[in-house]
Amino acid sequence: AAAAVAAAAAVAAAAYWRPNARSPREIYEDLCNELKNIDALGGCMALLEWDELVMMADGSADARATQKAALAEVVHERRISSALKARIDAANQPAVLSQLDAFEAANVRDTERNYLKSAKMPKALARLEAELSSQGYQSWVKAREAADWAQFAPTLEKILNMRKQIAAACAPGADPYDFCVDNFERGLTHARLAEVLGEVKAGLVPLIQAVGAKKQLQTHRALTGTFDVKQQEALSKQVAGELGFSYEHGRFDTSVHPFTGGTHPTDTRITTKFNEGDLISALMGTVHETGHAMYEQGRNKAHASLPVSEALSMGIHESQSLLWERMVGQGRAFWKYAAPLVHKYFPETRFATAEHLYQFVNVVQPSLVRVEADELTYPLHIVVRFELERGLFDGSVSVAELPAAWNQKYRQYLGVEPPSDMEGVLQDVHWSDGSFGYFPSYTLGAMFACQFYEAALRDLPQLEEDLAAGRFEPLRRWLNARIHEVGSLHPSADELCLAVTGEVLNPKVFIAYLTKKYSELYDL
């Protein structure tokens, strides 16, 4: 079968590659047109997925799974077609490549990379992946509501086996977990992750211990109590818009698990969730998702719907959300801007100053839930997930053992233990669609965010003053020019980081930032 596909592609390529009949530009544009059509189909799938997570009734799950599976099969066939292979081969000719600029050449490079990965995926596995994605999400929601791991475990077992089958088919002989990680972080291995996360862990453990030995930061009484959800939503929407989220090209909704989705940079959708007993978490979640959304809305318009306009990696995408949430939203300057807005929507907080709010969002307290964790202890939540995922793939941890293993690591690393599976092993949506290897991107993103922000401070000497005054455009434009519009031009995240900051990813920058900030806050 592989030989037949190759032969068909060769014949087709010969038809496409006629130097006297077609110019290099025509050959390249022909490839781009096919890629844009495939991207449009991907947008249809994204819309189905957004609707499933935000709008769809529970009773529609089976029908939606069938719809997604059918569309996934169509998309998969387009991504591995002999016609696409012919266009790739034709565009890869030296006479064509020599006429392309760097962004155009990156489109050809990444199209070939994506094709080779997709072409090795059996059609049956592509369909199974779509089916289990829908089934997994619905199973996870029900199990989480019931706080009952046993309801989700059989589905997760199927999802895990499916991921191993896909790895074996697409990367024979490779470590299956490395294959999963590569889907989110190009070229990264679990060994390198263990090294990076180990360095972060070694740097944070003594710092967290030192902070824990100090008196806790005082929380102003006006910041605790009950806060109207509608007012929280209005506050969050205003802040998102002032940071730079375009409502002309996006939506703001609620969901069980906050996320950023959509079908295109001109149709970017963010969600969050609100808790009447917590004034700040929804606002910080909104700032986080707005960072993701501004990356999407800022993608390269000249190469819209083409591979080079996409995010280089999940870690880079996460760096944009965390730069806005952590480096900006948890900084002193931001609260000089935001405090008057909090007072506007919640007059009862008017005696809480910007400094009170700054301290409030930077309290260090080991917690059970990753998305609610403080900046300092958050990486340990990622370490837990990374170690458990690695255990699932090397066989040292079974699906049935996950709740106990989870609880044990939380006791060991954070000194807390979940009272139920809802606050423990069932808290994240990621495993419900088989997104193994995704979690490390969060902490990688935090490290990239530190380096990017330091570079921005060097280039924008008035940045802190601008943020305090609510002038976010200079930083947004800086990020847009150096990261959003650059997309996947560089072959790896390290090379992008080098271009933006002058050095590849360096965990020491992250540790130094946290040490300086929390030493000052807690008077170490």
Image: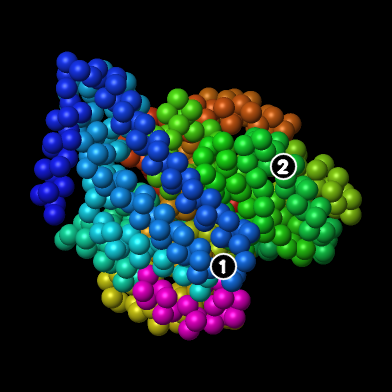
Q: Quadrant of the C terminus?
A: bottom right
Q: Which residues are magenta?
A: 140-159
Q: Residues within 10 Å of mark 1 (few under 14, many from 20)?
A: few
The percent position of residue 97, horizontal first and vertical second, equals 23, 23
* Residue 247 place in picture, x, y as percent: 67, 38
Q: Which mark is residue 239?
A: 2
Q: Which element is circle 1 on? A: helix
Q: Which label belongs to residue 277?
A: none
Q: Earlier in the sequence, mark 2 or mark 1?
A: 1
Q: Label 2 crowding class (10 Å Cα cut-off): few <14, some 14-19, many 20+?
A: many
Asked whether 92 falls inside the magenta stretch, the response is no
Residue closer to the observer: 79 or 294: 79
Q: Do the residues under discs 2 and 1 have CB atoms within 8 angstroms? A: no
- The N terminus, quarter of image: bottom left
Q: How many numbered marks appear?
A: 2
Taking depth in this image into account, of 463 and 231 the one nearest to the observer is 231
Which residue in the structure is indicated by mark 1? 60
The amino acid pointed to by label 1 is Ser
Query: How far across and down, in percent of the image, does residue 250 sit?
Result: 63, 41
Q: Residue at x 23, y 19 (%)?
A: 22
152 on left or right of 125: right
Q: Is residue 256 above or below residue 234?
A: below
Mark 2 → mark 1, Cα distance in angstroms: 34 Å
Residue at screen point 56% across, 60% down: 52
Q: Position of residue 488 (x, y in %)?
A: 38, 36
Residue beneath the point at 39% across and 55% down? 72
Q: Is residue 162 visible?
A: yes
